[in-house]
């Protein structure tokens, strides 16, 4: 691990995202992580002495969407979690291994129970019952990796929602063991929810406690503390514009979903949800609409994927909030939409501090979708493929934006508390944004100063989308703004022996886009499976190449191979400008309707 840079020059050299300067995990952080684990284990063991609940007062309807195909795979003994596939027919789920934390978290959170319930036949029910009661036998005494507040909350929601599915055909002894396990987990949550880090994890913990308090006999006393906690977090963790600190669209959807579930559970028990909770739901709904592409998927930024198929539509329908997004920024993202085309641009500084452990150096990156077909994308989060892919996916070259050669617009710093991940540091201090609607086109203008300290350069990007959505014109500008900027640029030029500062502008393509160099190298043709053809051109001031890329998505065993259009040039003066365009040359045939989803079994 490299040492912290001690001079400006060393800091400049250290900004390479692939060779980020990391601050070592401090003794205080290590002790905090150990103390957290110790206290979780202690309270899990103490909760094992709790009196069992006698039964259900009420059971909410299952609200999560399971995947039939994944459920069938589980019944067959094919376990695909966190990018790892283990084929073990007839082996209990708790014996399949999987030592890394993300794998264990997926198992212990019981999200797979939704998939078995989606199948719903006798074999699927038998697997679900065997694995749930196997968990009780193995971990119900407070042992194992699943005794954290967020996983416990997630698990309680699934167990309570699918209780009829799990208890059908079981005897009184099994039912008593089930209720006892639910009571222990509820007691554990009541003692440890406050230790959970703010954000999605705490919303999961508190929602689980609400579910348990409303549903289980003898647990009613936990509802009011949970509601007060939920109200406080809705007011403090969801900002006035309906965003969250991580700026992760998929995580915002998960928070929104939990708030909806909690509100429905309260309403079904003749209780009124707290006003801060209802207000948060109303703030989030238009923000999620602004972050949704034409294909129904979310923009893939800051560790988030496109979202489980149907989850966003279900959440918006459940909320019943019809407010449309306003013109401007939503959680730091700008949106252009016309015809069949949507463009979503990251137009704000990346998350900072503890909220940045999944954040990306993606400032001014954009994605473009035409109808149900993504065209220009970001590579996405590589977290499920290991630490190297995770780090690569966070760097600026993995996004559809401009990048100075070897320098991301933000760099990686120290590990977060409990080894949660590297935080983003040295991020752009200022990101400017302006949206101008017009009759001939809608325009977004944005700029960031991520390379001002190192090179004296500010990156400005302009995007113009025509009213019919058939053409996007772009301009990327590297420029100096002040006398000090020009001095820094001159020093950077001296370091290159006046050969210029190399930069690239990348346009990563979705794997289903077929790209070919056309017109003798003057253009790139992009053919979509819908029959549309888009043509990419540039003004000739950069070298244009078609290169390999990857598409990183959850639910896959390996990254998917794809391509990227790359513009390469050098900044030789105080202002360097590259213009490019992406225009539709051929539309979807009128006789065809592009209704087929994009590999829905594996997209996330």
Image (cartoon, rainbow, N blue to C red):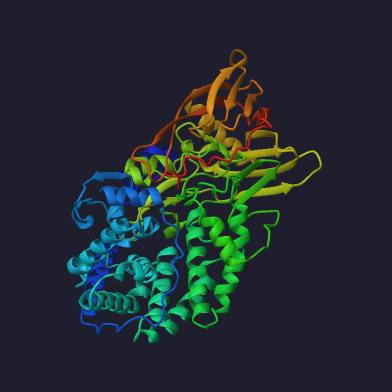
Q: Quadrant of residue 182?
A: bottom left
Front residue (pair 77, 18): 77
Front residue (pair 334, 413): 334
* 256 in relation to 524, above or below: below
Which residue in the rendered view is the most extreme toward the top? 520
* 313 in relation to 549, above or below: below
Front residue (pair 159, 233): 159
Can see residue 101? yes
What residue sits 34% from the left and 60% below the top? 113
- The answer to whether residue 57 is left or right of residue 293 is left
* 462 in relation to 129, above or below: above
Quadrant including the N terminus: top left
* 557 in relation to 566, above or below: below
Q: Quadrant of residue 442?
A: top right
Q: Quadrant of residue 386?
A: top left
State the count of labels. 0
- The answer to whether residue 413 is left or right of residue 257 is left
Residue 304: image location, x then y, percent: 47, 50
Residue 376: image location, x then y, percent: 56, 36
Residue 118: image location, x then y, percent: 40, 57
Can see residue 243? no
Residue 576: image location, x then y, percent: 63, 29
What residue sits 47% from the left and 52% below the top? 308
Front residue (pair 126, 318): 126
């Amino acid at each position: 691990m490299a040492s912290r840079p001690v001079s400006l020059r060393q800091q400049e050299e250290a900004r390479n995202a692939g060779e980020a300067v990391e601050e070592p995990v401090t003794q205080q952080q290590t002790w905090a992580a150990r103390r957290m684990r110790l206290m979780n284990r202690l309270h899990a063991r103490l909760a094992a002495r709790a009196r069992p609940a006698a039964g259900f007062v009420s059971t909410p309807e299952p609200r999560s969407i399971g995947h039939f195909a994944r459920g069938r795979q589980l019944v067959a003994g094919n376990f695909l979690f966190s990018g790892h596939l283990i084929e073990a027919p007839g082996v209990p789920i708790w014996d399949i291994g999987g030592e890394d934390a993300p794998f264990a978290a997926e198992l212990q959170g019981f999200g797979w129970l939704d998939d078995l319930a989606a199948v719903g036949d006798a074999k699927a029910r038998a697997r679900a019952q065997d694995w749930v009661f196997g968990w009780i036998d193995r971990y119900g005494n407070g042992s194992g990796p699943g005794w954290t507040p967020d996983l416990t909350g997630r698990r309680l929601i699934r167990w309570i929602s699918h209780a009829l599915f799990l208890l059908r055909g079981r005897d009184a002894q099994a039912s008593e063991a089930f209720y006892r396990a639910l009571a222990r987990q509820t007691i554990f949550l009541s003692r440890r929810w406050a230790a959970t880090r703010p954000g999605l994890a705490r919303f999961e913990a508190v929602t689980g406690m609400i579910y348990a308090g409303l549903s289980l006999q003898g647990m009613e006393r936990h509802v009011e503390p949970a509601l007060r906690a939920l109200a406080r977090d809705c007011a403090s963790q969801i900002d006035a514009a309906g965003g969250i600190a991580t700026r992760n669209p998929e995580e915002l959807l998960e928070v929104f979903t939990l708030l909806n579930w909690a509100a429905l559970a309260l309403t079904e028990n003749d209780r009124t949800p707290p006003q801060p909770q209802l207000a948060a739901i109303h703030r989030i709904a238009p923000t999620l609409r602004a972050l949704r592409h034409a294909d129904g998927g979310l923009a893939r930024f800051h560790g988030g994927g496109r979202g489980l198929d149907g989850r966003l539509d279900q959440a918006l329908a459940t909320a019943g909030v019809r407010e449309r997004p306003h013109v401007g920024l939503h959680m730091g993202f700008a949106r252009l939409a016309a015809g069949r085309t949507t463009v979503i641009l990251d137009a704000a500084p990346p998350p900072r501090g503890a909220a940045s452990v999944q954040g990306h150096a993606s400032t001014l990156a954009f994605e473009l979708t035409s109808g149900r077909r993504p065209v220009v994308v970001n590579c996405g989060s590589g977290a499920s493929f290991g630490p190297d892919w995770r780090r690569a996916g966070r760097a600026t070259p993995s996004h559809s934006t401009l990048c100075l050669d070897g320098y991301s617009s933000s760099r990686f710093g120290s590990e977060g508390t409990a080894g949660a991940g590297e935080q983003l540091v040295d991020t752009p201090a200022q990101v400017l944004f302006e949206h101008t609607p017009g009759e001939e086109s809608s325009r977004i203008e944005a700029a960031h100063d991520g390379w001002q300290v190192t090179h004296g350069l500010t990156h400005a990007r302009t995007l113009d989308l025509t009213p019919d959505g058939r053409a996007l014109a772009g301009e990327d500008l590297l420029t100096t703004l002040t006398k000090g900027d020009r001095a820094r640029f001159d020093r950077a030029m001296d370091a290159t022996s006046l050969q210029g500062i190399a930069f690239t502008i990348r346009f990563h393509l979705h794997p289903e886009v077929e790209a070919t160099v056309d017109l003798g190298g003057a253009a790139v043709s992009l053919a979509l499976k819908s029959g549309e053809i888009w043509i990419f051109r540039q003004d000739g001031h950069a070298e244009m190449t078609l290169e390999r890329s990857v598409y990183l998505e959850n639910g896959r065993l390996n990254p998917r191979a794809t391509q990227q259009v790359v513009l390469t040039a050098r900044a030789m003066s105080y202002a360097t400008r590259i213009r490019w365009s992406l225009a539709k040359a051929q539309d979807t045939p009128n006789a065809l309707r592009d209704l087929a989803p994009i590999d829905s079994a594996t997209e996330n």
